Image (cartoon, rainbow, N blue to C red):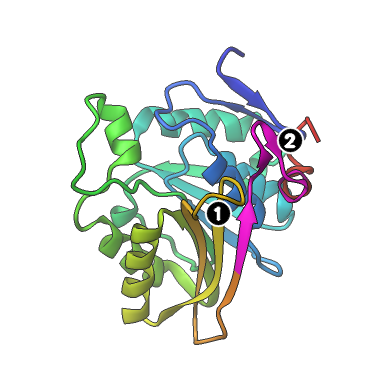
């Protein structure tokens, strides 16, 4: 398919999705840590790539996804149905604020929109995918608190300013930063994204840096090792 991206164990059609597969998402999907989650929720699934990666990584997990954009939700549904993990994947076309589930989740992940009060994209689909309202992060963390198990984890990726806001709002609800991974394009560049894990109960914060490029167009060994179970190139 013209707009598809093939991984080792699944294929992702990106048709009708404003936000295509990107580095933020695949790194989050590969870096999430949990011993043995039974129920996973992917907030704003887009193409469904993170949900598919987690279904591959956690073979006993039921992976649920929500997506506010109707066409992206339909695309994710097709990607799920065409995968080897189809029986463990589902997607709901709904805003996370309106989403309810009878059971709580062991693991919640999000690669959310992050432009707030910035110039809005003229293309509506891209605006939904990339821009957040003033109240979005407060509503997001409130919903995560509602849906997360007592011993569950919330993993997300955001630019530094927005990540700090989510961390602060999480602390107000008793969700504390447990892991912080700072993403750098290369060793000479400052961090441009943070992958964060929040959980209930305080713990020593684990910090690490992750470098994507060794040099121009050459990925680091760490990047290749992290994604070797997913990308055909490795």
Residue 233 lies, in percent from the top left, at 78, 30
Residue range of the region highlighted in magenta in the rendering: 208-224
Residue 210 is one of the magenta-drawn residues: yes
Q: Nearer the viewer, mark 1 or mark 2?
A: 1
Residue 84 lies left or right of residue 187; in this view the side is right
Residue 222 at x, y percent in the picture = 74, 51
Which residue appears at 40% of the width and 66% of the height? 144
Write down the quadrant of residue 129 in the picture: top left
* Measured Cα–Cα span from mark 1 to mark 2: 19 Å
Categorize mark 2 by other alpha carbons within 10 Å: few (<14), some (14-19), many (20+).
some
Closest to the observer: 194 or 20?
194
At numbered mark 2, what does the secondary structure look like: helix, strand or loop? loop
Q: Position of residue 145 (x, y in %)?
A: 39, 72
Quarter of the picture containing the C terminus is top right
In the picture, which quadrant includes the N terminus?
A: top right
Which residue is disc 1 drawn over? 183
Residue at x 66%, y 51% (from the top left corner): 30
- Choose between 145 and 80: the one closer to the eye: 145
Q: Is residue 197 visible?
A: yes
Looking at the image, residue 137 lies above or below residue 230: below
Which residue: 46% across, 49% down? 111
The residue identified by callout 2 is 231
């Amino acid at each position: 398919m013209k707009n598809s991206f093939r991984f080792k164990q699944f294929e992702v059609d990106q048709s009708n999705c404003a936000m295509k597969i990107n580095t933020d998402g695949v790194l989050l999907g590969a870096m999430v840590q949990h011993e043995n989650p039974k129920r996973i929720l992917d907030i704003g699934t887009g193409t469904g790539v993170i949900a598919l990666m987690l279904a591959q990584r956690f073979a006993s997990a039921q992976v649920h996804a929500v997506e506010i954009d109707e066409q992206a939700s339909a695309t994710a549904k097709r990607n799920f149905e065409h995968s080897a993990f189809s029986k463990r994947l589902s997607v709901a076309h709904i805003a996370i604020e309106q989403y309810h589930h009878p059971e709580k989740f062991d693991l919640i992940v999000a690669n959310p929109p992050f432009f707030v009060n910035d110039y809005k994209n003229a293309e509506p689909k891209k605006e939904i995918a990339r821009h957040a309202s003033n109240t979005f992060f407060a509503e997001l963390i409130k919903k995560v608190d509602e849906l997360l198990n007592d011993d569950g984890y919330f993993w997300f990726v955001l630019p530094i300013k927005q990540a700090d806001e989510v961390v602060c709002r999480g602390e107000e609800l008793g969700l504390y930063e447990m892991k912080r991974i700072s993403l750098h394009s290369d060793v000479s560049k400052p961090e441009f994204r943070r992958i964060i894990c929040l959980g209930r109960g305080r713990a020593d914060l684990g910090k690490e840096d992750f470098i994507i490029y060794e040099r121009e167009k050459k990925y680091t060994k760490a990047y290749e090792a992290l994604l070797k179970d997913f990308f055909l190139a490795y």
